[in-house]
Amino acid sequence: MIAQEDAALMRIYQEASWVTADSNGVIWALRRQDVTTERVSGVDLADRLLALSAAKGYSVYLLGAAPGVAEAARERMMIKYPGCNIIGAQHGHFPESENEFVAKQLAEIKPDILLVAMGIPRQEKFIDEARKHMQFGIAMGVGGTLDVMSGKVKRAPVIIQKLKIEWLWRTLLNPKKFSKAKTLPVFVRLVKQAEKKK
Ligand code: UDP
């Protein structure tokens, strides 16, 4: 929905090697077009990548969230996945004018996997800047994942996840997300309009 009004973000998504459906709304829209996919949440995918790091030794860098959170996430993940190779962690609350500086620092560090948790669209725009400087494996925008991994924010109970209302749970706990929830009926209308044009 943000990319509908942000051409730079739309270009970044179109150029991405992987775009996954981290929302039941997107899965609903795809099903209506006979595309079946499971939900692939940023937090689950990041968790799997950390397990892979422990198994294969891939180096991981955590960038994002408020000061102290990335470091706390690193500590908890090193306990959860012994041997997982998290080579650095840094908060994401630096001015956008420092994007290039931070990207160049990461280019020196050369992580195999860069997890960027700075929210949409800031994380995508940071990755777009970073890839000009870095020759690394993968970079992925993971939203609020470090907040969850650090224990600062609890994932919704499994029953809420199964009922597919995790978005409602997160919105009620964080009123800042109300503006996102308000776009839901607009999303439904746009999907139906696009179907009629076919
Ligand atoms: N954040 C950040 N830098 C910023 C703005 C936000 O690191 O300039 C972090 C914020 O602290 C939070 C995450 O980005 O940890 C955004 O989480 P959210 O759940 O809102 O992400 P989204 O809904 O976009 O996936």
Image (cartoon, grey):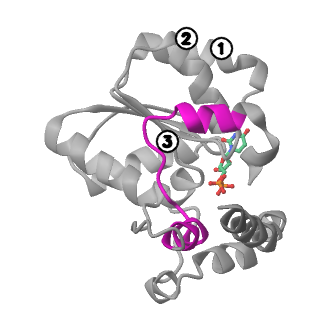
Task: Give residue 22's position: percent from left, percent from top.
Answer: 52, 61
Residue denoted by label 2: 104
For the image, the number of numbered tags is: 3
The answer to whether marks 1 and 2 mark residues whose Cβ atoms lie closer than 8 Å is yes
Badge 2 or badge 3: first in the primary sequence: 3
Q: Quadrant of residue 80?
A: bottom left
Residue denoted by label 1: 100
Query: Nearest the camera: 186 or 174?
Result: 186
Residue at the extreme left: 55
Task: Look at label 1 and name its amino acid.
Answer: Glu
Q: Is residue 138 above or below residue 197?
A: above
Secondary structure category for the residue under label 1: helix
Secondary structure category for the residue under label 3: helix
Residue sitting at x 44%, y 83%: 158
Q: CA distance from mark 1 to mark 3?
A: 22 Å
Part of the protein shown in magenta: 9-31
Task: Give residue 121's position: percent from left, percent from top.
Answer: 70, 41
Task: Give residue 46's position: percent from left, percent from top.
Answer: 40, 50
Residue sitting at x 66%, y 30%: 125
Q: CA distance from mark 1 to mark 2?
A: 6 Å
Badge 1 or badge 3: first in the primary sequence: 3
Residue denoted by label 3: 71
The answer to whether marks 1 and 3 mark residues whose Cβ atoms lie closer than 8 Å is no
Q: CA distance from mark 2 to mark 3?
A: 20 Å
Q: Is residue 146 above or below residue 186?
A: above
Residue sitting at x 78%, y 63%: 180
